[in-house]
Amino acid sequence: MPDADRPQELPARLLTDPEMINACRVRDFARVFRLVKARAGIYPSMIARRCDLTPSRVGEVIAGRRQLLHMDVIERISDGLRIPGGMLGLARRPWETPQALAVTERETPQVPEPEERSAASLPGPDVDSILALATRSNLSAATLEAFRSSIEDYWRRDDQHGGEALRPAVVGQLRYVVGLLTESRPPSIQNGLYGIAAELARLTGWTYFDARQYNQARAYFTEALQLAKEIDDRQFMANVLACMSLQATYQDKPADSLALVTAAQDRARSAFGTTPRVLSMLSMREAFAHATLGSHTATHRAIGEAHRQFEQIQESDPDPSWVTYFDELKLIVDTGIAHGRLGEAATAEPLIADALRREALTNQRGRAFHAFWLARTQLDQGKLDQACGTATQALESASAVASERVSGHLREFYDQLAPHRQEPVALAFEARLRAMLPPVSGSLHP
């Protein structure tokens, strides 16, 4: 765009101010807008115009009466106020490319004769956008099924390779579906679109969680909750809250974890037709929360409830597609992990070992994660040789998948080897760890 039309840049001193950096990191737009007004002279009416928001909405945000959570709105704020994407947990924005590096237009080359044109020529992106607009009104039940099939494929590839490489495609599809929601459609199609958008937002949140980028994960999980709430899908809301509960255990917030999974169970029980499989999965997440808190009685009670609900599953149950992963194998391994979190290694080891033997070879992240837990239970029992051998198996699976969560667990296992650091098997594991996983500052000591 011409320089006269280019949005005013924020002062460098504001973009480097710790208060601004922190406000952007947690997406506290009330603070961001106040700082932009005070330090850059950009008043609420100007913020509204530049970010394509209504002045009343900006006023409500500044007053603390409204939060901005939708990613398309956050992207508009980044672009309108010229806040670098990285400060808000977004990808690098197109306008961040320095002008000196931007591709300049050249003279239009002479058009070749028709017979010389390539048959593989593709229409430009502007034509693609026009065609997309022209077809948006033709959505059908088959279109929704196509979306759902792509989501299932995303989850498969996430298990096999990790979600980092998938994330741009998932986010792109999420934004496309959210855009479709602005049009008027029959209720069955509109509700289906909301459900698909919610699942895409949860998947995006999961990829960030698996990468240990917790603020971004929470933002997308929250978006998934809002989308599911629009259609009162309480079972799916329970699913998202269970994901957030699991994340809280990783952030050493066990009380938050328990509160979130309790809310998930309340949502599920208030829904019509919640299946035993869903309730079993939620009870197991409750067991994780209690185990993290160190509550033996409550953990055992939750494990018992998970198994009781699982025994009630019928083939005819209308299980949501997102819970079908929770099969007998997953119940067994999660039971072992819950005991392992409690320090009950002798009980945990045979359960995890049995599940790992039966686990699909294609689920690389699951195999790495479960092998780590098996190694940990073996180490807790003083079985050093076995533990290091199992952890090495975990390394082989972890090297095939991009998952900082799994890599972090294996570095955690290395730290637990400290009393045995000079033993040959520990030294061998350290060498494999260094060779197969990228080093993290402070995680491995020479």
Image: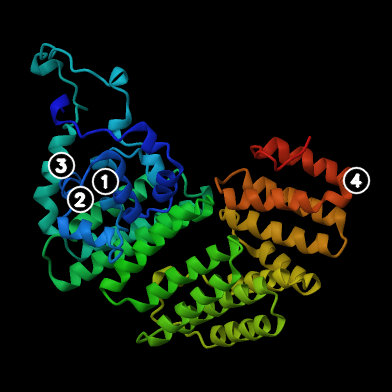
**Residue at the spot of label 1:** 37
- Compute the Cα span from label 4 to label 3: 62 Å
- Compute the Cα span from label 4 to label 1: 61 Å
**Residue at the spot of label 4:** 423
- Compute the Cα span from label 2 to label 3: 32 Å
Q: What residue appears at the point 28 percent right and 66 percent down from the top-left corner?
A: 65
First of labels 1, 2 by sequence position: 1
Query: Does the CB distance between marks 4 and 3 fall below 8 Å?
Result: no
Determine which quarter of the picture holds residue 39: top left
Closer to the camera in the image, 271 or 254? 254
First of labels 1, 3 by sequence position: 1
- Residue type at mark 4 is Glu
Circle 2 packing at 10 Å, graded few (<14), some (14-19), many (20+), is many
Image quadrant holding the N terminus, namely top left
Q: Could you tell me residue 55's position as x and y percent?
A: 15, 55
Q: What residue appears at the point 65 percent right and 69 percent down from the top-left corner?
A: 333
- What SS does tag 1 mark? helix
Residue found farthest to the front: 38
Query: Does the CB distance between marks 1 and 2 fall below 8 Å?
Result: yes
- Residue type at mark 1 is Lys
**Residue at the spot of label 3:** 129
Q: Given this view, does label 1 or label 3 mark the residue nearer the observer?
A: 1
Could you tell me if residue 155 is visible in this image?
A: no
Determine which quarter of the picture holds residue 180: bottom left
- What SS does tag 2 mark? helix
Circle 3 packing at 10 Å, graded few (<14), some (14-19), many (20+), is few
- Residue type at mark 2 is Pro
First of labels 2, 3 by sequence position: 2
**Residue at the spot of label 2:** 44
